[in-house]
Structures are given as structure tokens and as C-alpha cells.
Amino acid sequence: MSKAIAVLTLACALVATAAAAKPRPLTTQDYIDIHQLNGRYALATDTGDGLGRAATFTPDGSFRGFGNNGPYEPIAGVAARTTQNGNTGGRHFMANEVITATEEGADMTSYALILRPQNQERQPVVGIACFYTDKLVRTRQGWRFKTRAVWCDSDPASPFKAKVP
């Protein structure tokens, strides 16, 4: 009898472990909220709203960029993010968000085309094409970036660099 109980206990533990390892499915509202988070980040960055930009991250969240000269130092902590990125006239157009549930929350990859002013009349041109890769978590304040990395097409090491025929 005790052998049967041991087998049953082991079977229950395996089922519980397998169930715990599966990510919690994302709801339609989660997708909407994550999309809005991406938009709030872009708007705050483009308007020089450091506090608004910082509010899109967890308190210990980090941002890392990979540009023309390879990786630059990660920016971590709320204070650092509030002073980073003034309004340079750029405009982020975020698109093609692919959001996947994870055990911790969600992963997201998205494109960004960043328009830059071209001349005194501030006529914009595409200045940078990028991919963002993110780790997102649910907080009491809603979805936030735990980590955010941007990979510019101009970076020779970018895994997302467009292939030219």
C-alpha cells in the first residue's frame, strides 16, 4: 500500500511541476496594456519626459542599447533613466510587436523606425531602424519593462541586421 501511495505522490508532484512550469496565458487586456506600455515609452522618450520614461520600467529595470559603436553602458535604476534621453526631435514609430507569455511575465520584440529632423524646417527622415527586445513583468502599477534592449541596424553586431542582396 505504501508503494502505491509513493507512486501516486510522485505522479501528483510531476503533474504539479509540469503545470507550474507553463507560463500563465496572456489575456486580451494584457496585450492591450503591453501595447500601451510600448507607446508610453516612445511618447515619453520623444518628448523628453524622463519621469514618464522611467515609469515604464520596474524600479530595478534596465535599458541597454547597441548602436554604431557596439554596446553602450546599460542604464539601470529610476534616477538614471529620468535624466537620459532629452527631446532631440526624434519620433519613434513602434510596430510589429510579437508578445509571448513567459513564466516571469512576457517577452516582446518590436520594430522601431526613428524619424530625425532633416533641416531647419524640421522635415523628418528615417534616421534609425531598430529592433527592441524586452522582458516584461506585471506589477501593481501594470506591465513594466524589466529589461529593454535596442538593436540598431547600423550596429554591425546586431542579430537583426537586414541582409543586403
Image (cartoon, rainbow, N blue to C red):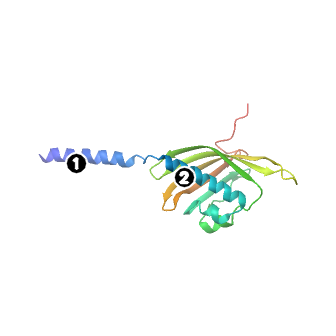
Q: Amino acid at mark 2?
A: Asp
Q: Which residue in the rendered view is the most extreme toward the bottom?
A: 79
Quadrant the N terminus occupies: top left
Q: Which residue is mark 2?
A: 33
- From the top left corner, tell me how far across and down residue 140 is, in percent: 48, 62
Q: CA distance from mark 2 to mark 1?
A: 40 Å
Quadrant the C terminus occupies: top right
- From the top left corner, tell me how far across and down residue 33 is, in percent: 54, 52
Q: Earlier in the sequence, mark 2 or mark 1?
A: 1
Can residue 72 be seen here? The reply is no
Residue found at x 30% / y 45% = 15
Instruction: Give the vertical position of 153 relative to 141 (above or below).
Output: above
Which of labels 2 and 1 is toward the front?
2
Name the one closer to the observer, 12 or 105. 105
Q: Which residue is mark 1?
A: 9
Name the one closer to the observer, 17 or 126. 126
Quadrant position of residue 14: top left
* Left or right: residue 12 compared with residue 29: left
Quadrant position of residue 83: bottom right
Residue found at x 25% / y 44% = 11
Q: Give the structural element (helix, strand or loop) at label 1.
A: helix
Q: Amino acid at mark 1?
A: Thr
